[in-house]
């Protein structure tokens, strides 16, 4: 018989798996394929480059998971995620993203599933821990799709994520 605790544990495990085992390998492959010009390319000045989106994902995950659920200080400077134009090197972006997801994974691995409905204030809004985690996974998925699409456009290759 499934209990609420079992469902909560399954939810936490699924969130961790999507972030680390599904989205991260896709982003890693995209970053490996894009050269520096492609990494910071934008069709229009109002668009976000892949580099900006990686910085944005790091800021979002740190704010909502590492800080919001894990209790670390919230040091996010969201506007800088989008205004960065110095072309942070690929290796630095990848290391930052991997470190961010490792920190989030540690928070989620230690998170008490019985506290999923506890409210937190994150980004000035009241959210349950469940809402915060769901937001991060959904948000990460959305931007992963954008990065995959830009990679396909810029490189003209099939990324072969699925062998169907």
Image (cartoon, grey):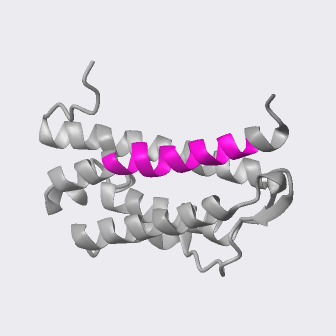
Quarter in which the N terminus is drawn:
top right
Q: Position of residue 142 (x, y in %)?
A: 48, 41
Who's the residue at 83% across and 36% down the image? Answer: 3
Does residue 35 sit above or below 15 in this rendering?
below
Outermost top residue? 164
- Is residue 13 inside the magenta stretch? yes
Who's the residue at 25% across and 60% down the image? Answer: 40
Does residue 87 sit above or below 148 in this rendering?
below
Q: Please say whether residue 41 is visible from this viewpoint.
A: no
Q: Is residue 124 left or right of residue 32?
A: right
Who's the residue at 29% across and 27% down the image? Answer: 162
Magenta stretch bounds: 8-25
Q: Nearer the viewer, residue 111 or 42?
A: 111
Q: Nearer the viewer, residue 134 or 10?
A: 10
Outermost front residue? 1
Q: Position of residue 48 (x, y in %)?
A: 38, 54
Provide the major secondary structure of the magenta segment. Answer: helix
Q: Please say whether residue 158 is visible from this viewpoint.
A: yes
Does residue 1 sit above or below 105 in this rendering?
above
């Amino acid at each position: 018989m499934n209990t609420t605790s079992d469902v909560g544990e399954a939810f936490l495990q699924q969130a961790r798996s999507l972030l680390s085992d599904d989205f991260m390998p896709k982003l890693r492959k995209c970053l490996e394929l894009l050269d520096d010009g492609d990494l910071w390319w934008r069709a229009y000045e109002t668009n976000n480059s892949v580099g900006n989106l990686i910085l944005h994902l790091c800021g979002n995950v740190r704010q909502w998971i590492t800080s919001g659920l894990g209790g670390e200080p919230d040091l996010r400077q969201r506007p800088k995620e989008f205004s960065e134009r110095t072309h942070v090197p690929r290796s630095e972006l990848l290391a930052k993203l991997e470190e961010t997801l490792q920190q989030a994974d540690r928070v989620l691995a230690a998170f008490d599933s019985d506290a999923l409905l506890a409210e937190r204030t994150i980004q000035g809004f009241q959210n349950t821990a469940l809402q915060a985690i769901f937001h991060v996974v959904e948000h990460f998925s959305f931007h992963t799709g954008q990065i995959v699409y830009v990679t396909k456009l810029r490189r003209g290759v099939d990324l072969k994520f699925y062998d169907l």
